[in-house]
Image (cartoon, rainbow, N blue to C red):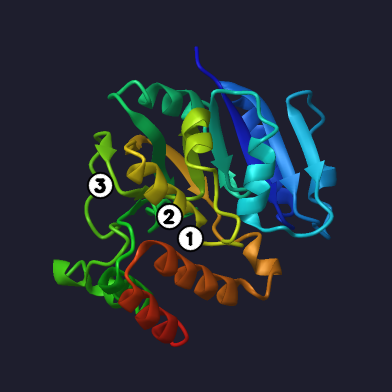
Amino acid sequence: MNSCAVIIVNYNTGKLLSQVIKRVLKAKGVDEIIIVDNNSTDNSMELLPDNPKVIKYFRKTNAGFASSCNYGAKRAQSDFLLFLNPDCLVQEDSIVNTLNSFKYKQNIGMVGVWVKNPDGTEQRATRRRLPTLWRAIKTYSKLENFAKFCSCFTGVNLNHLPISKKIQQVEAVSGAYVFIKTAVFNEVGGFDEDFFMHFEDLDLCKRTSDAGYNILLNPQIEVVHHQGTSSQSNSHVSEYKKQSLQRYFHKHCSVFSYHVIKITSHFL
């Protein structure tokens, strides 16, 4: 049976991190759990269970999410990588069922799952389209909140649509749970470390798709994401998000789109 390395980047996640690790330790299909700490100032790393599968790395500065994901991936020994947010709780069969999803069709590079909020509702980033200028404007101006009344308002996120339980091809999956073949991750160059936080997952999806690999969503697998636990201790999150939005458009979209986003992002 295939197995994976679970890579978790931690920054002041608190007690929830130990709960996440305990869940992963009970899960099937896990070779190793690599935790990269971005110079946390809380005691989250001290609360972790003592287990030979748990490998800890401590960075001297907060190098950002993308950089520390790559740092952990370089130290992994498995054929599959699961980048799991430090506040995302898996079920016992979540990981092994995701591994089995790679058998669904040929040329699969990445698989995502149904990511839920703690109240059981679908988290809006579970199913996404890649950003274009008009999609981004509708999403970040909150116009997409009206998409349930008219599809013309649909932006990046598709959570207003009923979710099918069938495995489906999508443009992008949630960054809270990114499952990718190690060979594909290495082929596309890993995460772009110029994204300090936010949009690094969309960028990875874009490059994986551009390299000719399919991205699937398996809604039969559910995880719960306590969104923003680490971000609460970082006062610069809003600015990082704007910078990353601009970088994504500079990298993947037209010059016109980039300049429009550069101007409008200050108001979004």
Q: Which residue is mark 1?
A: 199
How packed is label 3: few (under 14 Cα within 10 Å), some, or many (20 or more)?
few
**Lateral position of residue 190 relative to residue 152, left or right:** right
Q: Vertically, is 193 above or below 232?
A: above
Residue 268 in view of the camera:
no
Q: Which residue is mark 2?
A: 202
Tag 2 near tag 1, CB within 8 Å: yes
Q: Which residue is mark 3?
A: 163
Residue sticking out furthest to the front: 255
Of the residues shown, which amino acid type is indicated by label 2? Leu
How packed is label 2: few (under 14 Cα within 10 Å), some, or many (20 or more)?
many
Using the numbered discs, state the Cα–Cα distance from disc 3 to disc 2 in whole angstroms: 20 Å
Using the numbered discs, state the Cα–Cα distance from disc 2 to disc 1 in whole angstroms: 5 Å
**SS at mark 1 in the image:** loop
Q: Residue visible at 72% across and 56% down?
A: 11
Q: Residue visible at 61% across and 62% down?
A: 196
Q: Residue visible at 65% across and 24% down?
A: 77
Of the residues shown, which amino acid type is indicated by label 1? Phe
